Amino acid sequence: MKLLSIFFLSLSLGASIWAVFDVDPMRETCTRFRDEVVLSAALNALTFTFGACCTWLCGRFLLVTLSALATVSLSRVTLFAYDLKIICAADIASAPVGDILTDVTVFDRVQFTTWFALVFFALGLLTAHISSDILDWFDISRYMPHRRAPQRRHYKKDYRPTCEEDEEDYQSPKSPTTWIRIPY
C-alpha cells in the first residue's frame, strides 16, 4: 500500500476508534447504535490491517470485500448518528449524564468523527488505486536512480524492403518463392 493511502486510512481508523470511545461500548442504552459503531470500527481496522501488511495472506478479493463492507458500515453510522435522538428517543430518559443522548457536545463530536472517518476512508481507498507510487506524483524518482523503474528498449524494426533490394529483385532472376508482401 502507498504511504498516502496508509495515512488517510489511519486517520479514518483513528476517527472510528474515537467514535467508539465517545459512544461507550459498554453502554446499556441504544445498543443498536453501539453495535453499528463497533462493527464499523472493526471493519475499518480489518481493512487497514489486511491492506497494509497482509494482502498476500487474504488476497485482493477479501480485501475488496472488506473495504466494501466497511464503506457501507461507515456510511450507515454517519446516517444513524444524525437521527440518533429520534431512533433512541425511548432511551433518552434513562441515559446517564455525559452520554451521547444527553450531552450535545458528545453528540456533535460523534457526528463529526463519523463523517471524518467515512471521508478519510474513501480518500484512503481512492489514493490506494490512483497511483502506483507516491514518489511518482512528485517526480522524485528521477533523483533517486535506485527507485527508477527499469527502462525497456523498444526497437523499431523496419521489415519493408529498401529501394536497393527492390532493384536487385528486378535485375537478378531468382527462383520463385512463396513469400507474399503485404503493404502496411
Image: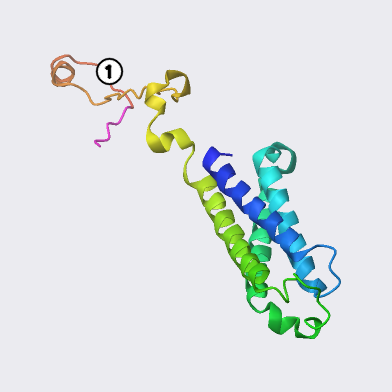
- In the image, residue 184 above or below residue 10: above
User: Do we see residue 39 in this rendering?
Assistant: no
Residue located beneath label 1 in the image: 175
Q: For mark 1, give the secondary structure.
A: loop
Q: Residues in magenta?
A: 179-184
Query: Depth check: 5 or 128 in front?
Result: 5
Tell me the amino acid under the disc marked 1.
Answer: Ser
* Prevalent SS, magenta region: loop
Q: Position of residue 147 (x, y in %)?
A: 47, 23
* Residue 157: quarter of image: top left
* Residue 90: quarter of image: bottom right
Write the residue at 71% across / 50% down.
45
Q: Position of residue 143 (x, y in %)?
A: 38, 22
Query: Depth check: 14 or 160 in front?
Result: 14
Q: Is residue 144 left or right of residue 108?
A: left
Farthest residue, direction front: 97
Q: Position of residue 22 (x, y in %)?
A: 72, 62
- Quadrant in the picture for the N terminus: top right
Write the residue at 66% across / 51% down.
14
Asked whether residue 183 is drawn in magenta, I would say yes
